[in-house]
Image: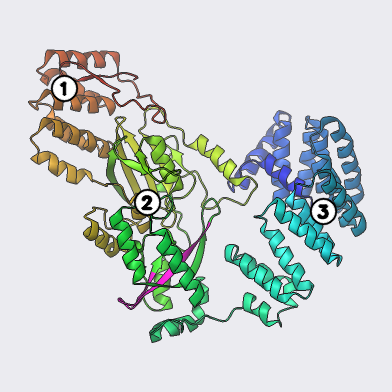
């Protein structure tokens, strides 16, 4: 028995699915065994759903009985009970339970009449009574026609009974209600196949497979498609012949041989036809007029990208990777005549100057993919490398508005929004209250995925009092951890934890072209994510500090270096050398840094070394009062002048 609302109701009870059923179920099983009386009705419902998902229908039924005894709305409990009884083959009991659900729903209205009617149809179908099933399903759709899943199920039932015209109308209506319902498109293509319309069927299936390639295996195993394998149009979709790029003028022999290599398919790579290559090329050229959405380009980077695009030919695509929020991203391969080699673009959004050399044969292609397929998933503590860079002062650099494309001053909210839209960064952020990535590599498919992701993100992006404000995200292909920190309310720092890349030559070429200073070991998707930002290291800034004589510049450099080295205990050596600095503004900045980073012992030393009585009195006052944790919200704190300077230069700290 299949009823769409049962799946929806189970998903609502389950809540946002992180793929952690075993953990949740183990916790609930323990609580149910130790103190069943303490379990709430909601807890029993959740346990029932988790048991059902694990295939334990008897256990799920027992949990629903406990939920009903604990006060679950009777219509909900009986509706769930109906489906569990049907799963156990107890169809008469399921019918009685559905009748009880219908009676209770008249009072509590927790289950819509349309869903109850459809469930009655699904139960009739389980009994083998197709005519009653269709009648009840139609009655439910007459009551509420705005449900794609119910139209889809009706279309399947009608198709199975040879009522093709009615089935087609139902499936088309399913797509009207939900145009992203891939199952309805698949069933419609399959229906056309059964109606002796192989050209329409295969054209529809081929179009569907472009966005859902995983359905190809389903079609190959589906007996309705297997029976039609003799048809040339069907075989062209389910078992296409390799495309040989003989359309490419002066195609080298190695490229033609590569296209015929039977191992190419094992990489998930498919050669492009002349038309597909031309379409990809035009799409890329158009994208790099302004740059792909969510990226930051300059006229120089756009011009360089177009220069490379003009000298390369898209030649193959694949494999695809599924991102955390279930977005399918397909890689692209280009032929570079000048280098007589392939280049791999991790996605079409990756700038051409960050495409990596990929050789001329399957072995070289496999080696180029090795760092990205299968997708790596190292926890934070196992990522062996770390770099930190200063990316700018709050409100003194810009990020593009998603609405106008124009640069706007970057505060925490704008910067966070930029990375949420950045095509090189995964969905699912976390804040300083969480020590490691709290998200799975890939979220399970579920209703209202984006809403659930957003709600959970609000929980895990909370900040822990006393820690530096930060937001972290995984990059999309290398799955490095990119963290944006905000220090002293004004200094943005990017920290990257990663596995060193084997493609340093690509980064070297980028740095040489634009005078940038990205570390050569950074993975290419990290560089792409940081494109458009400065990235200055503590070492470079400290070398500048040692040469500098201007007190204002020294103070500014010191503030940034303190942010870059805030977790480095050896930085206190630098601070101690500056305690006797002759300029009061430098010492004031140093004291504020010591205060912000809770270096109480160095402030104690300053009470002895500080020559200015007023400054010394302020330091002593702070120490007497005690150093409190900083408490402020950078999403709402837009004040630029947040400190009031006294006459001697040491800020009087507020909001602490």
Density class for disc 1 (Cα within 10 Å; few <14, some 14-19, many ≥20) is few
Give the dominant element type of the magenta stretch: helix, strand or loop. strand
Q: For the residue labelled by badge 3, is the local secondary structure a helix, a strand or a loop?
A: loop
Q: Earlier in the sequence, mark 1 or mark 3?
A: 3
Q: Is residue 46 above or below residue 224?
A: above
Q: Which residue is mark 1?
A: 605
Q: For the residue labelled by badge 1, is the local secondary structure a helix, a strand or a loop?
A: helix
Q: Residue 623 versus residue 508: which sits nearer the camera?
A: 508
Q: Earlier in the sequence, mark 2 or mark 3?
A: 3
Which mark lies nearer to you, 1 or 3? Answer: 3
Q: Is residue 210 left or right of residue 82?
A: left
Q: Is residue 585 above or below residue 378?
A: above
User: For the residues marked 1 and 3, what is the alpha-carbon distance in whole angstroms?
Assistant: 77 Å
Is residue 229 shown to the viewer in this render? yes
Residue 340, magenta (yes or no): yes
What residue range appears in magenta?
A: 328-343
Pointer 1 and pointer 3: residues touching (CB < 8 Å)? no
Residue 529 circle label: 2
Q: Is residue 600 left or right of residue 134?
A: left
Tell me which residue sits at (88%, 54%) in the image. 133
Residue 60, magenta (yes or no): no
User: For the residues marked 2 and 3, what is the alpha-carbon distance in whole angstroms?
Assistant: 48 Å
């Amino acid at each position: 028995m299949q009823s769409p609302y049962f799946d929806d109701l189970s998903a609502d009870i389950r809540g946002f699915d992180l793929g952690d059923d075993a953990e949740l179920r183990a916790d609930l099983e323990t609580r149910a065994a130790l103190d069943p009386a303490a379990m709430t009705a909601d807890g029993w419902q959740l346990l029932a759903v988790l048991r059902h998902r694990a295939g334990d229908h008897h256990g799920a039924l027992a949990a629903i009985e406990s939920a009903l005894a604990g006060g679950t709305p009777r219509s909900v409990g009986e509706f769930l009970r109906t489906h569990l009884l049907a799963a156990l083959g107890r169809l008469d009991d399921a019918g009685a339970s559905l009748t009880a659900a219908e009676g209770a729903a008249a009072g509590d209205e927790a289950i819509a009449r349309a869903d109850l009617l459809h469930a009655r149809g699904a139960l009739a179908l389980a009994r083998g009574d197709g005519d009653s099933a269709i009648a009840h399903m139609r009655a439910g759709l007459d009551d509420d026609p705005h449900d794609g899943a119910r139209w889809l199920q009706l279309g399947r039932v009608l198709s199975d009974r040879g009522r093709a015209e009615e089935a087609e109308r139902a499936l088309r209506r399913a797509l009207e209600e939900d145009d992203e319902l891939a199952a309805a498109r698949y069933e419609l293509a399959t229906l056309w196949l059964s109606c002796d319309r192989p050209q329409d069927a295969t054209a529809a299936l081929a179009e569907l497979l472009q966005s859902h390639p995983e359905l190809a295996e389903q079609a190959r195993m589906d007996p309705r498609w297997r029976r039609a394998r003799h048809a040339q149009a069907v075989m062209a979709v389910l078992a296409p012949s390799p495309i040989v790029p003989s359309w490419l003028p002066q195609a080298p022999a190695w490229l033609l041989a590569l296209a015929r290599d039977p191992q190419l398919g094992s990489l998930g790579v498919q050669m492009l036809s002349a038309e597909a290559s031309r379409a990809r090329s035009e799409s890329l050229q158009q994208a790099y007029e302004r740059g792909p959405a969510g990226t930051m380009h300059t006229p120089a980077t756009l011009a360089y990208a177009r220069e490379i695009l003009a000298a390369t030919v898209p030649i193959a695509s694949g494999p695809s990777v599924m991102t955390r929020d279930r977005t399918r991203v397909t890689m692209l391969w280009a032929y570079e005549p000048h280098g007589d080699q392939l280049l791999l673009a991790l996605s079409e959004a990756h700038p051409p100057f960050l495409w990596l050399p990929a050789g001329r044969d399957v072995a070289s292609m496999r080696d180029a993919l090795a760092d990205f397929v299968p997708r790596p998933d190292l926890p934070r503590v196992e990522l062996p490398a770390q770099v930190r860079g200063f990316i700018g002062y709050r409100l003194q650099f810009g990020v593009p508005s998603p609405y106008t494309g124009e640069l706007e001053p970057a505060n925490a909210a704008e910067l966070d929004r930029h990375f949420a839209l950045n095509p090189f960064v995964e969905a699912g952020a976390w804040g300083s209250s969480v020590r490691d990535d709290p998200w799975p590599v890939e979220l399970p498919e579920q209703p209202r995925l984006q809403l659930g992701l957003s709600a959970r993100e609000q929980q895990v992006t909370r900040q822990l009092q006393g820690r530096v404000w930060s937001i972290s995200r995984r990059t999309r292909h290398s799955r490095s951890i990119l963290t944006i920190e905000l220090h002293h309310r004004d200094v943005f720092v990017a920290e990257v934890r990663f596995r060193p890349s084997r493609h340093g030559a690509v980064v070297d070429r980028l740095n040489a072209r634009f005078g940038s200073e990205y570390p050569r070991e950074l993975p290419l998707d990290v560089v792409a994510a940081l494109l458009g930002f400065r990235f200055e290291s503590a070492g470079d800034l400290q070398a500048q500090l040692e040469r500098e004589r201007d007190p204002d510049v020294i103070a500014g450099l010191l503030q940034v270096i303190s942010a870059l080295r805030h977790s480095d205990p050896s930085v206190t050596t630098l601070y101690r050398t500056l305690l006797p600095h002759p300029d009061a503004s430098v010492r004031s900045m140093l004291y504020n840094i010591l205060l912000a980073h809770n270096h109480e012992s160095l402030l104690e030393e300053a009470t002895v070394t500080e020559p200015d009585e007023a400054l010394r009195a302020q330091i002593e006052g702070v120490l007497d009062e005690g150093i409190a944790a900083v408490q402020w919200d950078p999403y709402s704190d837009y004040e630029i002048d947040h400190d009031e300077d006294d006459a001697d230069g040491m800020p009087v700290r507020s909001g602490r």
